[in-house]
Amino acid sequence: MPNMTLTKTPMPEQEPNVRNKNFDEVALGYTQEMAIEEAQRCLRCKNKPCVNGCPVGVKIPEFIGHIADGDIEAAYQTIKTTNSLPAVCGRVCPQETQCEHNCVRGIKGEPVGIGRLERFAADWHMKNGKPEEFHIEPNGHKVAVIGAGPAGLTCAGDLAAMGYSVTVFEALHTAGGVLMYGIPQFRLPKEIVQKEISSLEAMGVEIKTDMVMGKVLSVDELFEMGYEAIFIGTGAGLPSFMNIPGEALVGTYSANEFLTRVNLMKAYRDEYDTPIIRPKNVAVVGGGNVAMDAARTAKRLGAENVYIIYRRAEEQMPARKEEIHHAKEEGIIFNLLRNPVAIHGDENGRVKAIECVEMELGEPDVSGRRKPVTKDGSNFEIPVDCVVMAIGNSPNPLIRSTTKGLEANSHGCIVVNEETMATTRDGVYAAGDAVSGAATVILAMGGGKQAAQSIDRYIQSK
């Protein structure tokens, strides 16, 4: 009999005033008993509406059914047939707007905790499963993947499973892209990411790091080296700024730089020499998940006061509700309907305050959200010694500027055919944030999966 409880089985978490002082994972995960209890809430619908909400088409009722029956390894293997990074997706996917949004149980209560169950299955396998053995017959074709983020890793894994010889070229010294440099340790432990990547390498995917493509090698040179198709998954790593006075002061960071120093370069650990200000009072500008990550990271670095400054109201914030909830629990101060106009410095050129104006919501803009309007004469200052700009990113222009025939739109995003992910250059495909602008991990993975299928058709038809 199904478990007809209207609410999800609670996920154990660290206490807020404990976790905001460490970088250990906030959510502790289900026990097997908890997972089985939650899995039994699934009705195993015949029309599977949850699957329609998943960008990579995970066989959700099937894997949850295996958990309900106590066969956790079968659940993991079911997920892996369509998802190369289940432990990652179980942690960072916005399930509430995707698979869980379509869950029938959500009509009269909370949806099934699909993400929590996916995480449980992946974590169980990492602890208890046997090392995976792959017996893939090589098909004699070579493909190059530029960028080892979610889109690139997914594309590489899917192509490797088809028998392709795949080489991934990554600009940084560690593979993983935003999974490594952007998402904090307390949300996505880096050991988890590395284990997922090791699984892809076991399939035969070769990863070359410190390869700034467009400088070290061009797309044309990759074709000359015998690669028959090329996938671009370089993300959106070029930070945006407000162009207000004071953004060049010492103590002002882009969220990209701030999070990279902490996540990838381990600035939070004393044994690392990564230079970073350990601030006392921090202003984080923005209202998305990256802003929440930066604010919660600053708190863990020892900041006494961390302010989120966002020009709209909370209901307009693009961040996940879970992330907003966790930030509030951890003591982050929300200054909403506020907008920075200047950053002020001291005599040494260091940040000492951020000047803001009050806002009010006017008529809806083109996105449908009510447009914030400045209240005249409402200027005020907040004393801070660090400002983090988390207002978005755009794709780095290096690849497109060094590749003939590769078109981009006015936002710098690579233009593709949305059905095939083919670019305007023959044999070159792209997906992820390099195409869409900053978006979610799972959407990037969905694009990488779509591109892998198109690359296979392209090469096999030659």
Image: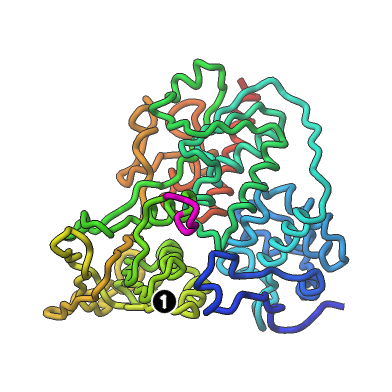
The amino acid on which the numbered mark 1 sits, given as a three-letter code, is Ile
Which residue is the site of mark 1? 332
Of 165 and 383, nearer the camera is 383
Q: Residue at x 43, y 51 (%)?
A: 260
Q: Position of residue 344 (x, y in %)?
A: 17, 66
Q: In this orientation, does residue 318 appear?
A: no
Q: Quadrant of residue 102?
A: bottom right
The count of marks equals 1
181 in relation to 404, above or below: below
Give the magenta range: 267-273
Of 138 and 35, nearer the camera is 35
Q: Quadrant of residue 349?
A: bottom left
Q: Quadrant of residue 43?
A: bottom right
Q: Position of residue 263 (x, y in %)?
A: 49, 54
Crowd rating for badge 1 (residues with CA inside 10 Å; few <14, some 14–19, many 20+): many
> Viewed as shown, does residue 212 lie left or right of 379?
right
Q: Is residue 227 magenta?
A: no
Image quarter where the C terminus lies is: top right
> Viewed as shown, does residue 425 lie left or right of 382?
right
